[in-house]
Amino acid sequence: MATTDLIDLAIETSKKAYVPYSHFPIGAVLLAKGGQIFTGVNIENASFGLTNCGERTAIFKAVSEGVLDFEELIVYGETDKPISPCGACRQVMAEFFPQDLKVTLVAKNKSTVVMTVKELLPYSFTDLE
Ligand code: THU
């Protein structure tokens, strides 16, 4: 699937976000090697700290299905500038993705910023091994 189609899927996916507290839906689309696609949304909780971000939902869905080889990640948020993943999600990306994996960050108006995992989390803990 082309990145533009994955962006549309991320926007569509964000409609499933469970966001009764923030009203800030996120949609993530994770493309695995071989073409399998895993979607993820943010899932909030009355105990706010238990919230799971869209990026981590997609990654955890894939890993729990035994899929560990990934091609690219798309993240959509209803922001003016392309969404910026939180630190926890960057650390989880560093755990499961190659450093040069392409991450496309998408804004409300579909403008994008494309970054690698290494750019999102330089000098990461996983670099030290
Ligand atoms: N959130 C994500 O799911 N991904 C991001 O990249 C940024 C933040 C969620 C967490 C929470 O449900 C809401 O957005 C507001 O912080």
Image: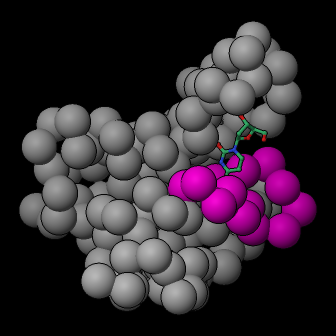
Task: Say which quarter of the image contains residue 31.
Answer: bottom left
Residue placed at 71% from the left, 35% from the top?
A: 25
> Where in the image, quadrant-wise, is ligand 1 located?
top right
| Foreground pick, 100 / 112 | 100
Residue 12 in sight from this viewpoint: no
Residue placed at 21% from the left, 36% from the top?
A: 64
As drawn, is 35 to the left or to the right of 124?
left
Q: Is residue 127 above or below residue 87?
A: below
Task: Say which quarter of the image contains residue 24.
Answer: top right
Is 82 magenta? The answer is yes
Is 102 magenta? The answer is no
Q: Which residues are magenta?
A: 76-89
| Foreground pick, 125 / 63 | 125
Residue furthest toward the top? 46
The quarter in which the N terminus is drawn is bottom left
As drawn, is 39 to the left or to the right of 61?
right
Q: Is residue 15 above or below residue 78?
A: above
Q: Horizontal and vertical percent for residue 89?
A: 55, 55
Q: Horizontal and vertical percent for residue 39?
A: 40, 41
Residue placed at 38% from the left, 76% from the top?
A: 126
Q: How is the image coloured?
A: one colour
